[in-house]
Every structure is written in C-alpha cells, then in structure tokens.
C-alpha cells in the first residue's frame, strides 16, 4: 500500500463521484467498498476491509446508506472505531440519524479521535463536478483541519454547530426536497390530464409563486423523457423522510406536511420504483391516475 492520507469507505453512487474528485485533485485515496471493482473504477487504491482503511490513513470519509450500516461499520467488533487513534478524523458524508451520529461521535472522542457529520446536497450532478454543498457538525477546528480535503468535491461548506447538527440540517433540507418533488409531480400529472402544455406551464410556475427546485431543475428535463438517472432513489428518499419524522418527534414539533411525501414515495416503492431515481415518483402517480406519462415518445416525431 502507498502512504495514503485519505481513506474512503462506501464508493457507491455518491461516494464514487467524490472519490474521483479527490483523485483528480491529486489526493491519493485508499478505498473500500463491498464492490471491489467500484474502488478501481474511481482510481483509488483498494483496501481489504473498512478497518484496514482506518489503520492506514489520517482522514476517513464515509458515504453509506443509513445509520444501521454506519453503526455496523463504525461500532462493530473489529470495526473502524476500534482502529481509530488520537487526532484521526472521520467525516460521515451519509444521511443519518443525528442521535446515532452523536453516539458515534462520543465513542470516537473516548479514543481521542474526531467525528464530523457532513450532510451533502446537490446530487450526482454536483458531485460529478465537485460542486456539492456540505452542512457540517462537530468541532469547528477539526473542520478547518480537513477543509482542504472536502474542498475537492464541494463548492460550499457550512459549519452548522455541534455533533449531529450537520445531519440535522441535511434531514431538514431533504424533507423540503421531498415535499417539492412529490407536490410538483402531482401537479404535472394533473396538468397532463388537463391537456396543458407542460413546457409553458413550467415557465408560468418558474415565474410565479409555485417555483421550486423541482420545477426549475427536474421537470424541464422529465417532460422531455430525461429522468436524470443517477440521483437519489425512491427508497432512499423514503428513508430520509422517515428520519425527518423521527427527528420531528424527538423535537416535539408538529409535522403536518409529512403525509404527502410519505404517501407519494411509498406508492412509488410499492409499484416497483424503489431502486429508480426519485424523479420517477411522477410515473408512480401517473400509474394510478390512468397511466399518465408526461413525455410521449410520439412528441419526438
């Protein structure tokens, strides 16, 4: 193995893109993923295990599916936490439960190591360009120590506060994303059934009070048949919404808007779109609305 200073555990849809940005920036990466070929495709050096990454590097980055997997990687016997050492930094770029994050933070602090939670936003397209937005929780001085690493794949880094604050901000942002995507999908299905010109309607919305990220960035592509493959799946979107509702319960706030996206993305999963990009929620809604599709291939003729 080379004398690598940065390790990456979890080189899936987002992790692979961030790793490529690091490599392109001249930062050597020691990577581990259950799909060993994924590590090679990113230009990283392959580690035999997650623990081996922790034993070999100074900064460890994580991009894993959920808190259950994160805790398994970090806290299991012979896991990453047992291999950490004083001053080592772990940055969790996953979407996770803030409560779980704080628990892992405390465990690493006992060993003199540091754990930052860094929620990311921007999706696959931003990751590809190294232009993600990061929301970071943990010690500010630790963030400053690893900022040069995070800069390789981000264009905006916001310090949110103590441990768990980054993942909390991420859940709040993702919930708004889910609400706007599900609501816009419903509106677009209704517009299609009503016989409206979808392009003109989007122009109207984007110059009116209904404008949102989905109307600006998603649906102009979707109505042409481009679902922007490679982003967050319906199953992962549902996971994030559930995490938000759990957070709302812990905070004791009224969550009166969660039912809509829970129903919409639950429908998508139930109809077999779970592993498809979350933009296909519009097709799930179309399926139960008479087989509606926003894009008709005949429109290309």
Image (spheres, rainbow, N blue to C red):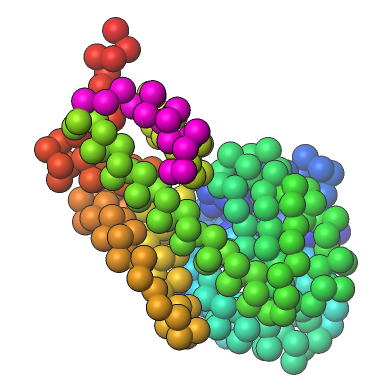
Q: Is residue 263 in the magenta section?
A: no
In the image: residue 189, left or right of residue 104: left
Residue at 81% x, 43% y: name it.
25
Q: Is residue 103 visible?
A: yes
Residue 228, x across and y down, in percent: 46, 35
Q: Looking at the picture, how far across and down is residue 48, in whole percent? A: 63, 63
Which of the pair 179/114 is nearer the observer?
Answer: 179
- Residue 163, above or below 11: below
Residue 47 visible here: no
Residue under the image location 39 percent in, 24 percent down = 199
**Residue at 53% over, 71% down:** 96
Q: Residue at x 79, y 77 (%)?
A: 139
Which quarter shows the C terminus? Answer: top left
Q: What segment carries the magenta color?
A: 195-210
Frontmost residue, 267 versus 128: 267
Judged left or right of residue 206, residue 60 is: right
Observer-nearest residue: 70 or 240? 240
Q: Locate residue 293, reporting x and y percent.
A: 24, 31
Is residue 287 left or right of 132 when viewed as pictured? left
Q: Position of residue 105 (x, y in %)?
A: 68, 83
The residue positioned farthest toward the front in the image shown: 208
Q: Please identify the quadrant where the N terminus is shown.
A: bottom right
User: On the image, which quarter does residue 83 sit in?
Assistant: bottom right
Q: Is residue 71 above or below residue 18?
A: below
């Amino acid at each position: 193995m080379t004398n690598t200073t940065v390790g990456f555990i979890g080189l899936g849809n987002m992790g692979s893109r961030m790793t490529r940005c690091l490599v392109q920036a001249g930062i050597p990466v020691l990577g581990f993923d259950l799909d060993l070929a994924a590590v090679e495709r990113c230009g990283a050096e392959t580690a035999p295990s997650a623990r081996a990454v922790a034993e070999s590097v100074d900064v460890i980055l994580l991009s894993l599916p959920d808190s259950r997997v994160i805790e398994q990687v970090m806290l299991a016997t012979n896991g990453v936490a047992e291999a950490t050492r004083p001053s080592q930094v772990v940055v969790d770029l996953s979407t996770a439960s803030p409560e779980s994050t704080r628990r892992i933070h405390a465990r690493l602090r006992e060993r003199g190591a540091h754990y930052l939670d860094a929620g990311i936003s921007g999706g696959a397209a931003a990751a590809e360009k190294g232009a993600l937005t990061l929301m970071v929780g943990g010690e500010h001085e630790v963030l400053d120590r690893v900022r040069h690493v995070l800069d390789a794949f981000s264009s905006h880094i916001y310090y949110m506060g103590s441990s768990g604050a980054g993942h909390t901000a991420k859940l709040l942002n993702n919930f708004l994303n889910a609400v706007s995507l599900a609501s816009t999908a419903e509106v677009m299905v209704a517009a299609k059934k009503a016989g409206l010109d979808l392009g003109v309607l989007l122009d109207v919305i984007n110059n009116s009070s209904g404008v949102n990220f989905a109307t600006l960035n998603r649906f102009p592509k979707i109505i042409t048949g481009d679902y922007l493959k490679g982003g967050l799946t319906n199953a992962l979107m549902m996971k994030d919404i559930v995490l938000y509702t759990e957070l709302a319960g812990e905070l004791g706030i009224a969550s009166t808007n969660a039912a809509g996206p829970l129903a919409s993305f639950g429908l998508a999963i139930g109809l077999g779109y779970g592993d498809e990009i979350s933009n296909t929620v519009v097709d799930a809604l179309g399926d139960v609305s008479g087989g509606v599709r926003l894009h008709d291939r005949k429109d290309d003729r």
